[in-house]
Amino acid sequence: MTARRALATLTAATALTAAAVCAATTPSQASSSGYATGPSTVDGRPVLWKNRDHWSTPDGWKVLPYAYPADGASFGSGDRYTARFDYTGITALGSSGLDAITGEQIPWAGSNVRGLGLVQVSGHTLTSAFATDHGFPVSQDLANGMTGGYLNHVLLSRAEHVDEVEQILRDTNDGGGFNASTARNTSTIITVSDRWGNVATFEIDGDSFTRDNVTEEHHPDANGDYTSPHDDDKDRPNPADGAYGGFDWRTNFGKVDWTKPTGFPFFLDEQVTTVDANGDVVNSGSTPDGIHDWEYSSSAVYRHTRVGIRMDDPHDKSYRYFIQQQVPSHGIPTEHTVESLSRCIGDLPYSGEKPTGFHVNRFVSTFGFVGVGSKPGDPYDGKLATIWVALGEPAVSVFVPVFPYAGTVPDELADMYLASNDKRHLVYDYTDDDACGYSCGRNIDHSIDVDALVGPGGYYGEGGIQEYTFGIEDWAFDQYEAFMADLRTGGRTDAELRADLIAWQESMAATIKAHYVAGTIPTDTP
């Protein structure tokens, strides 16, 4: 059974239950993202990365890819495009993978068959509660508005250019005719790339948004802080297709210096924002440091800088950089030469158990996603867009490649989260696989067993689970790059291309999963 067919077995009663749960509670989620394009990547093609953090639903860790076939559906009177593009998204079983209003399966990252990629993180500083707490009006239609997950679905199924993403956001500021709403019910930050190599980040509340084109590299200032400006580009001329370039990242707060007509600031940075010994966020002094002064999550504050120091390393970015890659010794510490942003738990070697709550890979991380895009001159109009996904906490999981244009996902990935969970049991002490909040159930243990992860005294990939996981991926990277070199010569019909993509990804998924479960490394070609 394919993942899509498995998801289709969810009943209407399940969808109604999900709606009731989501209406009654606000999901607890965070996530980190990073992205690069143009001269900041090894080949000019855009790369998007995300780690999803989620802990509020019991089965939100049961993640899987699904293939959505475009059906021409409309969400309402403001839907100028309708659902016209197939896509592959990463979702979860249970209520966190279903839209509360429509019952539609929703993606938390994905790519479509026209080469549009999307990653999303929760926007803590854009929520209705956040606005109310600071004395500003609520921008969301909390009862009827389109949710962030459903917005992801809308964008992936309708847009092929970053400008179309902006247009859809403009069309839904007033609800867009969705469910008789007057605004969206969104507090989200998304980054999209298209097949022309364009990349932009959109910070979105209920009835407005900002656009931040990726046109520069954001390096630290003299104090080591990431204070370079982020301006709102939505009402300005955009770069020409293919002229975008640079890198950027988000944790969970707005970075764009824009103020709504109501006076609500999307970004406020007048003080140094740090975390004290008790784990509380505190502000001091009168010096900007690139962190939103009103961000309340200590993890978001820590992760912003920790992602930044990985993004500004002097290496051109590639999909491997976000997964794991041998790099020159500019890394931290300098005696080691592996970069693995998605799996980063801070400095290694480390003896014993290491707390991960403030790191990029956290004990509540449920999947890692890396999307590889296209650039002008590539054949097949975006059909070679690739998803690499780790279906579980990235530190202990293995990344597997999937092509959205294949129109299906390998059967082996429908329950890959179980294999990842088996590995996770080797590095955390817990008995209940289901989550029941940030500090109970599967999340009772906040510290990872570093010896089991990388071997005693080990660095990333040197021993333990990561020794064979990285070995499997190194083999997969070689297979992928040889396959892509052949595909990029062109010459296949669309039907031939799809058939080859299906056969290749099925073989790769089967091989990767078998070796991952066995703890071995493949040596032959698929």
Image: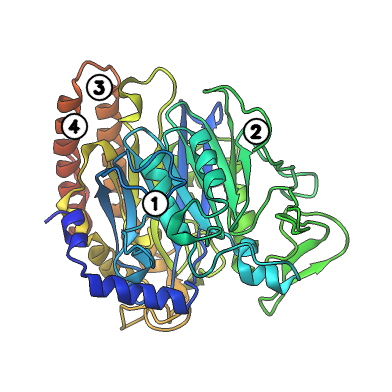
Q: Nearer the viewer, mark 4 or mark 2?
A: 4
Give the distance between the C-alpha atoms of the residues marked 4 and 2, in whole angstroms. Answer: 35 Å
State yes or no: discs 4 and 1 in contact (Cβ < 8 Å): no
- Residue at 43% from the left image edge and 79% from the top image edge: 445
Which residue was labeled with disc 4? 498
Give the distance between the C-alpha atoms of the residues marked 4 and 1, in whole angstroms. Answer: 29 Å
Q: Is residue 265 visible?
A: yes
Give the distance between the C-alpha atoms of the residues marked 2 and 1, in whole angstroms. Answer: 35 Å
Above or below 362: residue 483: above
Q: Is residue 458 visible?
A: no
- Residue at 44% from the left image edge and 56% from the top image edge: 178
Q: Residues within 10 Å of mark 2 (few under 14, many from 20)?
A: some
* Residue sitting at the far left: 1
Which residue was labeled with disc 2? 216
Can you tell which quarter of the image residue 488 is in? top left
Name the amino acid type tagged 2.
Glu
Position of the N terminus by quadrant: bottom left
Give the percent coordinates (x, y) of residue 338: 46, 46
Q: Nearer the viewer, mark 4 or mark 1?
A: 1
